[in-house]
Amino acid sequence: REREREREEGSRALSHTNKSATQRAHIMLVNSLAAEDTSGVLGRKLIQRRDCREHDVYIKIKYCGICHSDLHQIRAEWDMSIYYPMVPGHEIVGVVESVGESVTKFKEGDRVGVGCFVDSCRECSSCKAGWENYCLGVPGKQDSMHGTYNCCLKDNNNELLFGGYSQSITVDENYVLSIPDSLPLYVAAPLLCAGITMYSPLSHFGCREKGPQMKVGIQGFGGLGQMGVKLAKQMGCHVTVLSTSASKQKAAEELGADFLVTSDTEKLKEQEATFDLIISTISANYDINPYFGLLKVAGTYCLVGKLFL
């Protein structure tokens, strides 16, 4: 009976007055999985989703990937602001159900995705340059980049943003991505976090343009590492996986990468000054110094994992 009641409530649209707006907007109640505290336990919870404003896209969520950062945040394991209740999830894919009257990029039925942020100030130098993920905010306002979840909008009556562990989401069209028909939605979801985490440095440091001229090392061969190998190979790079686990060699080679066991100091020495780019995905504590010697002069060592000092 309780679940039936929740479903009935979730299907109703409630009229709600936003204190920061001059017009009335509809708020929909939808089901989600939410954390209420640091225990890491998720429970069913009804959350509010706004109806489409002028430039909004309302998305029926089909899949949402599970990122390890979701686990860190619901448990408050990072040194950052934490807001409960928290609905995690920023690898969101689904289908457009409705759009605002001024939307031009999407229509009902389109396959779309939403990644790690859903808005920004749009006025700072970063936003104007297309680097909204580095939004600096503007004087007189507190909010800058709007994270997909665990984000409190101080300039909008402390509104909490909820992520993709839910039935639907409403997002401005400028922060929604198109998913091609050739890509299954469940496959596309991890590209919105792990994918962009690896694609961004590969692209930024020249792999798209130079491709075969680049020797790239992917340090660590978990989810991020495997994504990095696939992307770098598609860009035409010579790719080597750097790992402490010899057991991962076969899997790396099946993706077309060479493999280097980093505990083998002789093999490391043979590779000195040969890499243009090394991307470390390692989240554990380790000594990075031995790997600088693997880089060519003016080579780049990029950290996308976490360095514990």
Image (tube, helix red, strand yellow):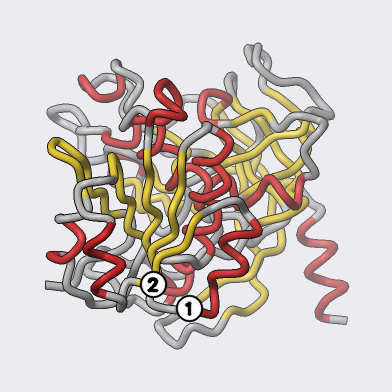
Tag 2 secondary structure: strand
Q: Callout 1, which amino acid?
A: Ala
Task: Tell me the residue that label 2 is attached to.
Answer: 261
Which corner quadrant holds the C terminus?
Answer: bottom left
Q: How crowded is mark 2: few (under 14 residues within 10 Å), some or many (20 or more)?
A: some
In percent of the image, x 49 and y 49: which residue is there? 228
Residue 218 percent location from the top left of the image:
40, 55
Q: Which of the pair 96/4 is nearer the observer?
A: 96
Q: Which sits earlier in the primary sequence, circle 1 or circle 2?
A: 1
Above or below residue 237? Residue 93 is: below
Q: Callout 2, which amino acid?
A: Val
Residue 251 percent location from the top left of the image:
62, 66
Q: Quadrant of residue 134?
A: top left
User: Could you tell me how far apart the alpha carbons at marks 1 and 2 are, in whole angstroms?
Assistant: 6 Å
In percent of the image, x 26 and y 63: which residue is there? 81
In percent of the image, x 51 and y 30: which residue is there? 175
Which corner quadrant holds the N terminus?
Answer: bottom right
Specify the farthest residue to the bottom: 39
Q: Which of the pair 274/177 is nearer the observer?
A: 274
Above or below residue 141? Residue 44 is: below
Q: Quadrant of residue 170?
A: top right
In percent of the image, x 71 and y 32: which residue is there? 179
Q: Which of the pair 148/66 is nearer the observer?
A: 66
Disc sitting over residue 246 in the figure = 1
Q: Residues within 10 Å of mark 1 (few under 14, many from 20)?
A: few
Above or below residue 22? Residue 279 is: below
Residue 80 percent location from the top left of the image:
24, 64
Residue 233 percent location from the top left of the image:
55, 41
Q: Which of the pair 177/20 is nearer the observer?
A: 177
Q: Do the residues labelled 1 and 2 touch (CB within 8 Å)?
A: yes
Above or below residue 27? Residue 172 is: above
